[in-house]
Amino acid sequence: MLGRISDYWKRLAGDAPEDGKREQPPSPPSDADAVVFSSRVRLEAPPSSRPHPAQRSLADTTLRQIGLLDDHAMKILRKQQIRTAAEFTHMAPDALLPRVSVGQVKRMQQAVRMAHAIDGMRPWHAIWLFAIHRRSPNKLAGESPAVLHRDLIRFSWSSRGQKVVGQRQLPSLDRVRSWIESARIRQQRQQAKRALENLDLPAAA
């Protein structure tokens, strides 16, 4: 009996870790591990901090950066000393006849102005919005991002939309949301400016 007890305690001693140290449980992943894991998720890149052509002044935006004119149309305008987006928006709408109709030129001028008013928007985006009856920043301010994004997708599927959109990529939902937020901020500033102008200030003594 004593021999069996002795063998039992020897076996226990043999299974124990050296120096009486207990085996530590695996440590949880560090923050660095979590970052590495998260970086594998493919997310849409955030908007660039570099000024977008649509956010620069119209005087600093070239005809090519407008993105609505072909080479021949730009050549015609340069012969008339029209070289910037600012000059384009103020030119006579018949400047490109007979190649481009007066109505088309007016629509492109409106698109350039709207894109300039909304952060992250390009003139061709504005043309798409006009096609689905969103023709002004104030109209855009009242939109739902999900509904507007859905309508843009549906438009791109139509026969007309396929011609207008062409090979260009549709904006993401996040991009559409940023347009609406920009339009709302612009609207709020306009309302604050009008309220300030309408204040009855006391006359100077």
Image (tube, grey):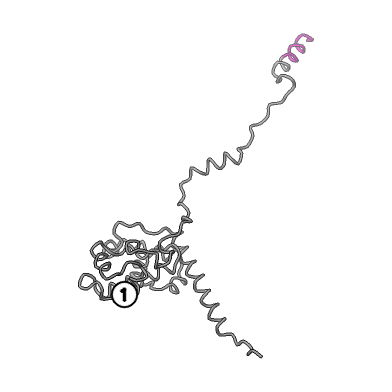
Q: Quadrant of residue 175?
A: bottom left
Q: Which residue is pictured at 23% across the width and 63% down the height?
A: 72
* Horizontal arrangement in the rendering, residue 205 relative to residue 1 (left or right): left
Residue lying at the far top of the rendered structure? 3
Residue 150 position within the rendered picture, expressed as x and y whole percent measured from the top left: 39, 63
Q: Which residue is pictured at 51% across the width and 70% down the height?
A: 185
**How busy is the neighbourhood of tag 1: few (under 14 within 10 Å), some, or many (20 plus)?**
some
Q: Which residue is pictured at 48% across the width and 67% down the height?
A: 182
Q: Which residue is pictured at 63% across the width and 37% down the height?
A: 28
Residue lying at the far right of the rendered structure? 2
As for residue 127 lying within the magenta part, the answer is no
Q: What is the secondary structure assignment of the residue under circle 1?
A: loop
Residue 25 position within the rendered picture, expressed as x and y whole percent measured from the top left: 66, 31
Q: Is residue 106 above or below residue 46?
A: below
Quadrant location, the C terminus: bottom right
Quadrant location, the N terminus: top right
State whether the magenta stretch is mostly helix, strand or loop. Answer: helix
Front residue of 104 and 58: 58
Identify the residue under disc 1: 91
Front residue of 16 and 124: 124
* Horizontal arrangement in the rendering, residue 99 relative to residue 91 (left or right): left
Q: Is residue 71 above or below residue 20?
A: below
Q: Amino acid at mark 1?
A: Met
Residues rendered magenta in the picture:
1-10
Front residue of 113 and 59: 59
Q: Quadrant of residue 83?
A: bottom left
As for residue 3 lying within the magenta part, the answer is yes
Front residue of 88 and 200: 88
